[in-house]
Amino acid sequence: MRLLWLFGLLIGLARVAFALEVGNQAVAPAKFDQKSAMQFSQSVVGQQVGDYTLLDRKGRSVKLSSYRGKPLLVSFIYTGCSEVCPVTTQFLAKAVKYMQAALGADSFAVISVGFNAPWDSPQAMSDFASRQHINLPNWEFMSADAVTMKNLTRDMGFSYAYSVTGFDHISQLTLIDQEGRISRQIYGDSFNLPVLGEPLKKLVGNVQTQYPGWEGISNRIRLFCTIYDPGTGTYRTDYLFFVNLFVSIIVICTLIAWVVRTWRRSPRRGSPKIDQVA
């Protein structure tokens, strides 16, 4: 009887150990594969993003289609992050400030999206924005329900996985054109400003140079003259090319006028006479 009882106890302990092992495997953090995440991110470039409904910091519904007509920058964060997401957001704020000064505050929009639904609620996103002191125009902090967020991150090519410290995720800034297509992915907690500035300037140009009349022409000239200054690390508008072109045209025209005037004032010679032989 005792042997039978001991045998049953051993079986019970084995079952408990097995259950604990299965349970540990079920809740174990998934391993984040950076290479696969990068490949997936690049695979969506050129694709149309679905028209999802998100919530702004005040809990109001906002459709992604409401951003059509101008370029849109999308950054994914989670509000419980204490290191990477705040650093990424602070760097993005600096880059956005420089590009708004160069291209115009209304030339593009920015949204930071909290992917940890439902914890990244409108209130949590509002608190995160306040902690980061983000008050730039045309920048909103968005959230959504878990199903919407799963589909949105899939469309954007954004990958993340649960870890013991929160989430492992790709640091990704997505550029969306005026028609809602993914134009480019930018990676890293920081990057050289032209990595964002040049493709963003092109997207803004695709919109602003299509304006009719003088507005489209002036926008084309302004964007052409908006250049990156390595000395200051910012973009600036430099019309020196057109100034030099104007001066060159004046000099050439003056030279041509002088040649014509000189030619007209010079004595004209008749045709040479031909002696006739008697």
Image (spheres, helix red, strand yellow):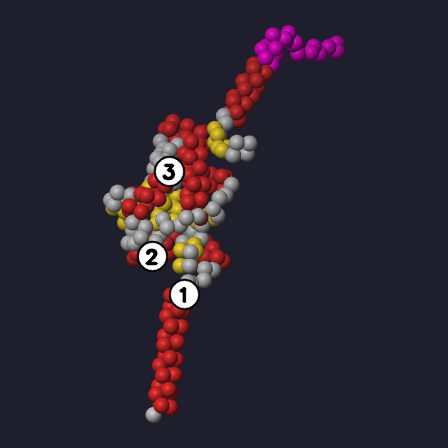
Separation (CA) of disc 3 from disc 2: 28 Å
Badge nearest the viewer, 2 or 1: 1
With respect to residue 18, does 144 lie above or below?
Answer: above
Please indicate whether residue 148 sits to the left or right of residue 162 in the image.
Answer: left
Name the residue located 44 percent from the left edge and 44 percent from the top edge.
87
Answer whether labels 3 and 2 touch (C-beta < 8 Å). Answer: no
**Residue 188 in sight:** yes
Q: Which residues are magenta?
A: 258-278
The image position of residue 259, as x and y in percent, is 60, 14
Residue 245 or 153: which is nearer the viewer?
153
Amino acid tagged 3: His
Please identify the residue farthest to the bottom as the structure is shown: 1
Q: Which mark is residue 196?
A: none
Residue 28 badge: 1
Q: Secondary structure at mark 1?
A: loop
Residue annotated with mark 2:
150
Q: Residue furthest right?
A: 277
Residue at 29% across, 51% down? 144
C-alpha distance separating marks 1 and 3:
35 Å
Residue receiving disc 3: 133
